[in-house]
Amino acid sequence: MSETSASSREKKAGAQHGDGQFRLLRERRFAPFFWTQFLGALNDNVFKVGFTSLVTFQAARFSGVDPKTAAFLISAIFIIPFVLFSATSGQVADKYDKATLTRFVKTFEIVVMLIGGAGFMLHSAPLLYVCTFLMGVHSTVFGPVKYAYLPQHLQPSELVGGNGLVEMGTFVAILIGTIVGGAAAGLTEHGAILLATCCVTVALIGRVASGFVPKTAALQPDLKINWNPFSETWRNLALARQDRTVFLSLLGISWLWFVGATFLTSFFNFAKDVLSANPDVVTVLLGTFSIGIGIGSLMCEKLSKRRVEIGLVPLGSIGISVFAIDLFFASHGIMPAGHLMGVSEFLRIAVHWRILADLFLLAMFGGLYSVPLYALIQSRSQPTHRARIIAANNILNSFFMIVSALMALGLTSAGVGIPGLFLTTALLNIVVAAYIYSLVPEFLLRFLAWILVHTFYRIRLVNAERIPAHGAAVLVCNHVSFVDAIVIMSESPRPIRFVMDHRIFRSPLVGWLFRHVKAIPIAPAHEDAELLEKAYDACGRALADGDLVCIFPEGKLTRTGDINPFRHGISEILKRHSAPVVPIALRGLWGSVFSRHDDNRWPRPIQRGVMSRLTLAVGEPIDPADATPEHLQALVATLRGARK
């Protein structure tokens, strides 16, 4: 049996198992790839942490190196290759088998680490800077391969879990690499030998693991590579901009790299100059941060119900700013101890536990922020261009990280302390997040939907997979409450064009939001016949563009809990553009404060340990020729059942 067919069999079998994302670690289609990228991230961090620790705490051994700026310089050198070579690496990943590329990259890593090992042995800063640059080249080439590999081997329902495992693995590797690199660098006599040995050994093991990565067919083997990095970079960014949500997701990920780079590269000076702590405490700080990211990444699958849930992204950005601001207040004004504390002494001081909690929670929310964005990019990018979209992401990441390094260098040179740098980053995060969410309200709407469903309701889904993941369709649903659209949106795999009353659409408070999510205003014929025709035409154009359109054919909220007669609007829409019609029924919202029930009340978050329950049931798509108002009403009534 071929590698491809074996992977396909695992993929189908995996979808039938219910033991979560960790099952993937037992399967050939994922496990060798996971360990390959894990070992690469581990080696990156053993090398970088070892190098940074040596030049920060043993600067006398390295001539011409400024320990206060070395960490930022190492970070900048590492990301220069992303600017220079990302465009080329994205094309290569689309053109060639990703398994072959993976093995090539891991062989290259062995050569790079031999150079780095020589740099450690000779205490040669120039050799170590060259190795840092070459490791950046290694990561530049492997990045598009890594993130384009996953959608070819994972089911859509596994994509969030797989990305969560990769992010978790990356930051566990950072944790282990931090411990090993920091501990080895702390050994004055044999530290350099140990670092050199570790880096070369991990590279060799990674090469062995890469040999088991299954064949991954090239998605565009006839692609002609443009070797001009400048024109290709511009072309890749243009490809990414074709889908506005994808492009802004790329910006969102790049901003997280800005934030993460600012914190991670500051930890050495933060420990030494602010906390009066030795390199072992740096390991504790980086370890706490890494564990937080890992746990947040793993939480995504559970919180998102194995879907690409972008509603978690605003939640993540809020948490990042809240705990970064608290980190400033926790660390601002700490008096120098007069000596460098070890781990045990550091942990005996109460305020340091607050600092560790802030770092952990900040990182955990970073995991909630990043995993859905990576999964969104992978799921919505064209397969033939996916690696180049990832390359565009790497280009943006590198620019943001360079700006991060320049900002850190500028602020520290101006006398701003590390706590002030953290506060500046937190406040910038608020501004950037608000800007992105104003451009793409889909993130905020999904966030509101996620909060509503997870705070007040326990939602039961019946055949929700029948909502099409691709292509045009009309969704028809009974109209029970003011939050019907939010509930439907929270369970849809992609955006929906909702048809809504023109008065709500034009309301001054939330009108801008409805306009940005491309809702379609409608009015009864006796109020505005022209607007009614425009609404039908807009629905037809949306279907022609392959969108989902949702309409509530009753035309108004129920006042009794019973389904009102369906109007003929659905027939008018289908005259403009024929598309499958999917009946949907909501039950459990009647009687809530969001309905027109005479004795409506707020849903109870907790009632004898059980949240208020509602059900979303989805019927089989039907042919547009059979989609008469009467037939659809009967189908929706059957789906809803007796409970209102």
Image: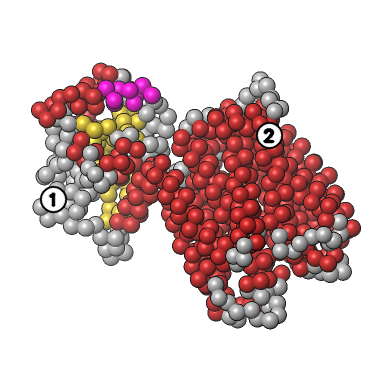
Q: Position of residue 226 (x, y in %)?
A: 68, 25
Crowding around mark 2 (Cα neighbors within 10 Å: few <14, some 14 to 19, many 20+) is many
Q: Amino acid at mark 2?
A: Ser
Q: Check the image and report above or below for 103 versus 354.
A: above
The residue identified by callout 1 is 597
Is 542 within the magenta?
yes
Bounds of the magenta segment: 537-545
Crowding around mark 1 (Cα neighbors within 10 Å: few <14, some 14 to 19, many 20+) is some
Q: Nearer the viewer, residue 486 or 272?
A: 272
**Proximity of marks 1 and 2: CB atoms separated by less than 8 Å:** no
Instruction: Kindly tell me whether residue 539 is visible in this rendering.
Output: yes
Residue found farthest to the front: 414
Residue occupying image coordinates x 23% and y 49%: 588
Q: Which mark lies nearer to you, 1 or 2?
A: 2
Q: Position of residue 5 (x, y in %)?
A: 62, 30
In this image, 342 relative to 432: left or right? right
In this image, 521 relative to 412: left or right? left
Residue occupying image coordinates x 25% and y 47%: 509
SS at mark 2 in the image: helix
The residue identified by callout 2 is 89
Q: Position of residue 241 (x, y in %)?
A: 51, 32
Residue occupying image coordinates x 77% and y 59%: 51
What is the distance, in whole Å, between disc 1 and disc 2 at their CAs?
A: 59 Å
Q: Amino acid at mark 1?
A: His
Residue occupying image coordinates x 52% and y 72%: 330
Q: Position of residue 112 (x, y in %)?
A: 81, 46
